């Protein structure tokens, strides 16, 4: 069974589009879209394990310029 997460992302003003595009190019990311509300981008990712998710996906997400805050929400049932 794979680990799946949604990550809600706040960005610097005017950076949502570039952040969503950069995140969408990361391997393991299955969804990356700009949204309205308290967050600017929502993404979904999946990986074989939580450790792998952190090492291969989350570390790359955190390196994307323009991100100010993230909230990771693991999927509990799928």
Image (spheres, rainbow, N blue to C red):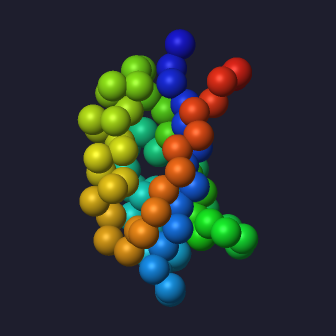
Q: Quadrant of residue 39?
A: bottom right
Residue, far top = 1
Image point (70%, 21%), residue name: 77
Report whether 34 appears left or right of 62.
right
Residue 15: x and y in percent read: 46, 80
In this rendering, is residue 28 above or below 75? below
Q: Position of residue 62 (x, y in %)?
A: 33, 56
Foreground: 39 or 33? 39
Q: Is residue 13 above or below residue 2?
A: below
Q: Which corner quadrant of the image does residue 64 belong to?
A: bottom left
x, y percentage for residue 2? 51, 20
Q: Position of residue 35 (x, y in %)?
A: 67, 68
Residue 30 appears in the rendering: no
Q: Judge whether 77 appears above or below 35 on screen.
A: above
Residue at figure coordinates x 49%, y 33% from the top left: 46
In the image: residue 69, left or right of residue 32: left
Count of numbered badges drawn on the protein: 0
**Res 7 seen here:** yes
Q: Residue drawn at (28%, 59%), measured in percent from left and top?
A: 63
Q: Quadrant of the C terminus?
A: top right
Q: Residue furthest bottom?
A: 14
Q: Residue at x 67, y 69 (%)?
A: 38
Foreground pick, 69 / 27: 69
Location of residue 49 with respect to 30 vertically, above or below: above
């Amino acid at each position: 069974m794979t680990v799946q997460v949604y990550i809600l992302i706040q960005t610097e003003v005017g950076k949502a589009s570039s952040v969503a595009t950069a995140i969408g190019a990361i391997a393991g990311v299955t969804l990356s879209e700009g949204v309205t509300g308290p967050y600017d981008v929502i993404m979904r990712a999946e990986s074989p394990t939580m450790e792998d998710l952190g090492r291969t996906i989350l570390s790359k997400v955190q390196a994307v310029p323009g991100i100010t805050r993230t909230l990771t929400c693991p999927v509990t049932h799928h």
